[in-house]
């Protein structure tokens, strides 16, 4: 009988924590989706997370050989991906060396990475995109997640903070972003902005139906052009071979992808890279971060 090794993939979200065991063929088993508050309890939430994961392995792994644990975290982290600088939606993580706290609980390596990078790894696998050249991923959810990969390696930056596309400053905007700076791009193109737009301008529809029922309005058209600007900016700087677009906003019913593409083309440099835009849309599924975490771990083992 063939012997498999497994990765414990974990996707730590602001609302839910998703996890599962993933084998070499990226088959997922024992998948769970648990409210974050049920796991991150007490004064030491890192300890409670470690204990939960240990119990999960005791319940689900059995005789399976687990080779690593890999977790995606929606937070700014150090260059070596050990310390979380700021995680406003995850209790007890900010300023902590999460890797140092978790590693002693497990006899195998623990890997931490930005959650959007784990989604990016899954998309490379899902769409059979060779991990070479320059590839960018833009994931529009509450904010604007971004991955820049060059010759098979996501850019981390000098301090671990590379790829903050959502925090490009917008001319003449003085509203305060969640990061503390004024006028950041994601304040005008992320999901939080859409919620405010729906409340102030389209109170007659639910946020879920915003694009399907109001997609042809000038306000939505203006939003789409604004969303195209950071994406086109990165395209003009990097001339990527592939552009991955995803996230909860783009997965909303009726999202006008073709119009977004038209605006990206409009603002991209002519003739190139505008004439060679290779755009692929990510599928917004809950397991993607877990599967991507396993792929990331196997590449780094």
Image (tube, rainbow, N blue to C red):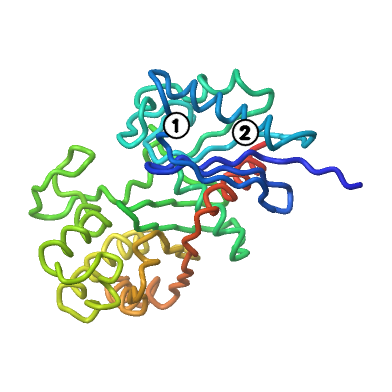
**Mark 1, other Cα within 10 Å: few <14 / some 14–19 / many ≥20:** some
Q: How many marks?
A: 2
Secondary structure category for the residue under label 1 = loop
- Left-right relation of 50 to 276: right
**Residue for point 22% across, 81% down:** 216
33 w.r.t. 276: above or below: above
Between residue 44 and residue 78, name the one nearer to us. 44
Quadrant in the rendering for residue 259? bottom left
Residue 98 point in image, percent of width and height: 47, 25
Q: Quick check: marks 2 and 1 in contact, CB under 8 Å?
A: no
Residue 213 point in image, percent of width and height: 25, 78
**Residue for point 46% across, 24% down:** 46
Between residue 242 and residue 23, name the one nearer to us. 23
**Residue for point 51% across, 25% down:** 99
Q: Earlier in the sequence, mark 2 or mark 1?
A: 2
What residue would you read off at disc 2? 56
Residue 154 point in image, percent of width and height: 50, 46
Between residue 15 and residue 108, name the one nearer to us. 15
91 w.r.t. 161: above or below: above
- Left-right relation of 246 to 101: left
What residue would you read off at disc 1? 79
300 w.r.t. 135: above or below: above
- Left-right relation of 99 to 221: right
Residue furthest to the right: 1
Quadrant in the rendering for residue 227? bottom left
């Amino acid at each position: 009988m063939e012997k498999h090794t497994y990765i414990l993939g974990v996707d730590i979200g602001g609302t839910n924590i998703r996890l599962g065991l993933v084998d070499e063929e990226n088959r997922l088993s024992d998948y769970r989706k648990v409210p974050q508050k049920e796991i991150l309890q007490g004064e030491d939430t890192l300890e409670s997370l470690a204990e939960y994961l240990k119990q999960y392995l005791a319940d689900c792994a059995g005789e399976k050989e687990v080779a690593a644990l890999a977790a995606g975290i929606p937070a700014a982290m150090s260059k070596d991906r050990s310390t979380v600088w700021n995680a406003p939606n995850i209790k007890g993580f900010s300023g902590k060396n999460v890797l140092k706290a978790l590693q002693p609980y497990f006899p195998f390596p623990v890997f931490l990475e930005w959650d959007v990078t784990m989604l990016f790894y899954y998309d490379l696998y899902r769409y059979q995109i060779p991990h070479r050249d320059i590839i960018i991923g833009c994931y529009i959810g509450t904010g604007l997640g971004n991955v820049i990969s060059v010759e098979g390696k996501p850019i981390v930056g000098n301090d671990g903070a590379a790829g903050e596309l959502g925090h490009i400053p917008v001319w003449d905007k003085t509203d305060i972003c969640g990061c503390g700076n004024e006028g950041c791009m994601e304040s005008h193109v992320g999901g939080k902005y859409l919620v405010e737009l729906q409340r102030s301008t389209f109170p007659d529809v639910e946020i879920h139906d915003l694009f399907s029922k109001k997609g042809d309005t000038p306000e939505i058209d203006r939003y789409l052009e604004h969303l195209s600007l950071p994406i086109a900016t990165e395209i003009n700087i990097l001339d990527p071979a592939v552009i991955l677009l995803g996230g909860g906003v783009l997965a909303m019913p009726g999202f006008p992808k073709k119009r977004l593409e038209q605006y990206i083309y409009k603002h991209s440099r002519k003739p190139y890279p505008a004439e060679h835009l290779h755009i692929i849309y990510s599928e917004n599924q809950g397991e993607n971060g877990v599967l991507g975490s396993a792929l990331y771990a196997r590449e780094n083992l």
